[in-house]
Image: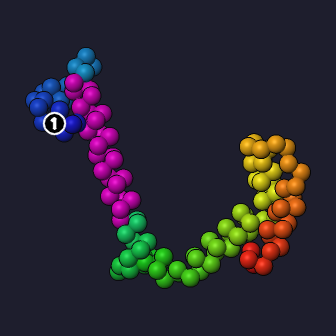
């Protein structure tokens, strides 16, 4: 849209300092936003491409090369954060109090689940 507004304006109109011409003013802002958006999109595409594809640039293809380490780190983080006994107690107590009557058996249920052989 900014490019269309730019192309429909003559050179004198586009380069003038007339602040009353809202069409030219809007065209400048829209063109700038479009160009910056395009540049950002290209750099993001290149960054993601370099993460997954092995190119002739140092540091590219890092995810396939380090897949096992990344997978292990994410698994450990999830297990340590979301399956922590204190976290589970807090979350289950909060949900029980929200949706049911005030429960007192939640810590017992969490201990039973965490200590069950299926959980390990």
Q: Where is the C terminus found, in terms of image quarters? A: bottom right
What residue appears at the point 19 percent right and 30 percent down from the top-left corner? 15
Q: Is residue 64 left or right of residue 101?
A: left
* Residue 109 seen in render: yes
Reading the image, the residue beneath label 1 is: 4
Residue 32 coordinates in the image, percent (x, y): 30, 40
Q: Is residue 102 left or right of residue 27?
A: right
* Residue 57 seen in render: no
Q: Does residue 24 belong to the magenta stretch?
A: yes
Front position in the image: 7 or 92: 92
Image-quadrant location for residue 72 = bottom right
Front position in the image: 84 or 28: 84
Residue 58 coordinates in the image, percent (x, y): 43, 78
- Dot 1: few (<14), some (14–19), or many (≥20) neighbours within 10 Å? few
Q: Does residue 100 belong to the magenta stretch?
A: no
What residue appears at the point 28 percent right and 35 percent down from the top-left corner? 30
The count of marks equals 1
Image-quadrant location for residue 55 = bottom left
Front position in the image: 75 or 36: 75
Residue 51's place in the image compared with 110, above or below, is: below
State which region is magenta. 23-46
Residue 19's place in the image compared with 88, above or below, is: above
What residue appears at the point 53 percent right and 81 percent down from the top-left corner? 66
Q: For mark 1, give the secondary structure.
A: helix
Residue extending furthest toward the front: 101
What residue appears at the point 85 percent right and 48 percent down from the top-left corner? 103
Residue 97 coordinates in the image, percent (x, y): 80, 44
Secondary structure character of the magenta stretch overall = helix
Residue 37 coordinates in the image, percent (x, y): 33, 47
Image-quadrant location for residue 75 = bottom right
Q: Is residue 109 left or right of residue 66?
A: right
């Amino acid at each position: 849209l900014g490019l269309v507004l730019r192309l429909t304006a003559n050179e004198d109109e586009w380069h003038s300092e007339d602040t009353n011409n809202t069409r030219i003013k809007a065209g400048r802002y829209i063109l700038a936003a479009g160009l910056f958006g395009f540049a950002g999109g290209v750099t993001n595409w290149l960054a993601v491409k370099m993460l997954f594809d092995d190119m002739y640039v140092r540091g590219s293809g890092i995810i396939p090369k380090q897949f096992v380490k990344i997978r292990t780190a994410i698994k450990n983080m999830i297990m340590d954060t979301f399956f922590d006994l204190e976290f589970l107690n807090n979350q289950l107590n909060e949900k029980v109090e929200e949706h049911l009557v005030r429960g007192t058996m939640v810590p017992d249920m969490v201990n039973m689940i965490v200590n069950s052989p299926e959980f390990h």
